[in-house]
Amino acid sequence: MKLVTYSLEGEPRVGAWLDSASIVELSGTPEFPDSMLGLIHEWDAWQERLPALIEQGPRRSLSDVRLEAPIPAPPRDILCVGKNYVDHVNEVKALGYGSIPSHPIVFSKATTTINRPEGLVDISADPTETTDYEGELAVIIGRGGRYIDERDARDHVFGYTLINDVSSRDLQGRHVQWFLGKSIDGYAPMGPVVLTEEAAGNIRDWRLQTQVNGELRQDASISQMIFSVPEVIATISRYVTLMPGDIIATGTPSGVGAGHEPPVYLKPGDEVVVSCDAIGELRSRFV
Ligand code: MG
């Protein structure tokens, strides 16, 4: 199933995505959590009841609500994997970002970057005017844990969504560590839905694409990741206890603006759409 966080008259709620025009309200159900994070914590109690609730629940037109990021306030910063597609490593090599990693590169991005689907990304806060897109598959952790075995990793996944790991390239370089260049407020559009793990199937078959103003810039298969989703979960949890609601951005394929010769950065008025056949389209306007 596909779940959404949305707001109605300013109140956050959880619903299920029916189609591109409508959702079903879930938060109106007595005792149903009013946030996705709450639902993740109570997943065992609600999972089996959800199909019936979706069948019977009140319908809402998507045009009457505002979609929000699936988890607007996660328990901590977004965990991100850098350089996880070979073609992307090669395109940024010339910028001084080194060679193919032998272990996953993990960095973080502030929670205040989180932005909603159809949201505005304010690039005037980047004094270097080198803001770039990175379309990525994001994993949302359901059951936390430490020392998670790669073979059990997907039992710990709540679901999948899309993220645009918007990055200021010159700030990344200027401050050496990537955190500031990746963490300007609003620089992580996320959504539009969470596809739950039990409905996900073979995620390696999915295609991830990014378009800028309608032009296809990134187009890759999830199977091209250097470190798979289970490997990433196993690696991080070897050292860090994963928590319900943690978000892991799994890296971007080739085709970013910095990889162009000369680089092509985002400018006010640009529209970026990150899409995945299984999940949907995450659209943002840069201003
Ligand atoms: Mg990234």
Image: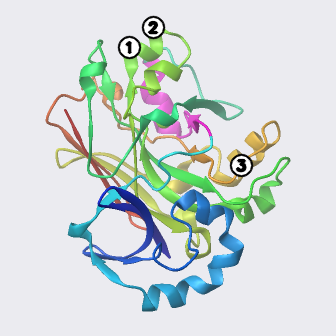
The correct choice, above or below, for 142 with respect to 102 in the image is below
The correct choice, above or below, for 1 with respect to 117 in the image is below
The quarter of the picture where the C terminus appears is top left
Amino acid type indicated by mark 1: Asp
Q: Where is residue 106 shown, x and y percent of the image?
A: 64, 32
* In the image, residue 90 lies in the stretch drawn in magenta: yes
The residues tagged by marks 1 and 3 sit, at their Cα atoms, a distance apart of: 32 Å
The disc label shown at residue 243, or none: 3
- Please report whichever mark, 3 or 2, sits nearer to the chain's N-terminal start: 2
Can the viewer see residue 109 in this picture?
yes
Q: Quadrant of residue 157?
A: bottom right
Q: Which residue is drawn at 52% across and 55% down?
A: 222
Closer to the camera in the image, 53 or 193: 53
The disc label shown at residue 170, or none: 1
Segment tinted magenta in the rendering? 76-94
Closer to the camera in the image, 96 or 189: 189
Amino acid type indicated by mark 2: Arg
- Please report whichever mark, 1 or 3, sits nearer to the chain's N-terminal start: 1
The residues tagged by marks 2 and 1 sit, at their Cα atoms, a distance apart of: 6 Å
Q: Where is residue 47 shown, x and y percent of the image?
A: 63, 78
